[in-house]
Amino acid sequence: MSHDLFEAARAAMEKAHAPYSRFPVGAAIRTTDGRIYAGANMEVASYPEGWCAETTALGHYLMDGGGEIAEVAVVAEKMARITPCGGCRQRLAEFGRPETRLHLCDDAGIVETTTLGALLPHGFSGETLK
Ligand code: THU
C-alpha cells in the first residue's frame, strides 16, 4: 500500500543534486488526505549550505498547505535502510507525530517501518516554548 510512496521517494532521488557527496537521497511525505510531496538532497559548493531530501520534501509539503502527515519514506542510492539525520528527525517531528510511520527503504522498496517517535525519543518540542 505504501509502495507508491517509496516510488515517489525513489523518483525524487533521481533529481538529487549531490555532486560533492555522490550520495543521492530521496524522501516522500503523504498527508492523511492523500497528497504526496517528494524531495531530494541539494548540495552546494559551500558544503554546509546544502540540505537533505527530507527537508526539500517538507518545503513542498508546507508550501502546499501542510496538514496532517500519515507516512514518510526515505531512500538512498548507496545505502539500504537509510535513516534520517538528526536535523531531519527534528524537522519531521515538527510536522508529524510520534506515531507517524516512517518507511526505511532500499532500491527495491520498503525494508523496515518505524515511527518518528522511535527515531527521536525525548525530542525537544515546541510545547516547551509555549
Ligand atoms: N542526506 C539526506 O538527504 N538525508 C539524510 O537523512 C541523510 C543525509 C544527504 C545530505 C548530503 O547531501 C548527503 O546525504 C551526504 O550526507
Image: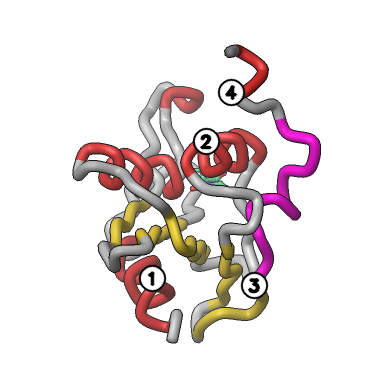
Does label 3 point to a residue whose CB lies under 8 Å from ligand 1? no
Q: Where is residue 42 in the image (x, y as percent from the top left)?
A: 36, 41
Circle 4: residue type: Gly
Q: Do the residues labelled 1 and 2 touch (CB within 8 Å)?
A: no
Of badges 1 and 3, nearer the viewer stands: 3
Residue at the outermost top position: 129
Separation of disc 3 and disc 4 at Cα? 25 Å
**Numbered label attached to residue 2:** none
Mark 1 Cα within 10 Å, few/some/many (few <14, many 20+)? Answer: many
Q: Are marks 3 and 4 in contact (CB under 8 Å)?
A: no
Q: Earlier in the sequence, mark 2 or mark 4?
A: 2
User: Is 129 placed above or below 107 here?
Assistant: above
Residue under numbered circle 1 = 10
Residue under numbered circle 2 = 94
Q: Do the residues labelled 2 and 4 touch (CB within 8 Å)?
A: yes
User: Is 77 placed above or below 27 here?
Assistant: below
Separation of disc 2 and disc 4 at Cα? 8 Å
Q: Quadrant of the N terminus?
A: bottom left
Residue under numbered circle 3 = 113
Circle 1: residue type: Arg
Q: Which of marks 3 and 2 is nearer the N terminus?
A: 2
Q: Where is residue 34 in the image (x, y as percent from the top left)?
A: 29, 68
Tell me which corner region of the image, top left, top right, bottom left or bottom right, holds residue 28.
bottom left
Separation of disc 1 and disc 3 at Cα? 16 Å
Query: Mark 2 falls on what kind of element?
Result: helix
Query: Mark 4 falls on what kind of element?
Result: helix
Separation of disc 3 and disc 2 at Cα? 19 Å
Of the pair 129 and 36, the residue shown nearer to us? 129
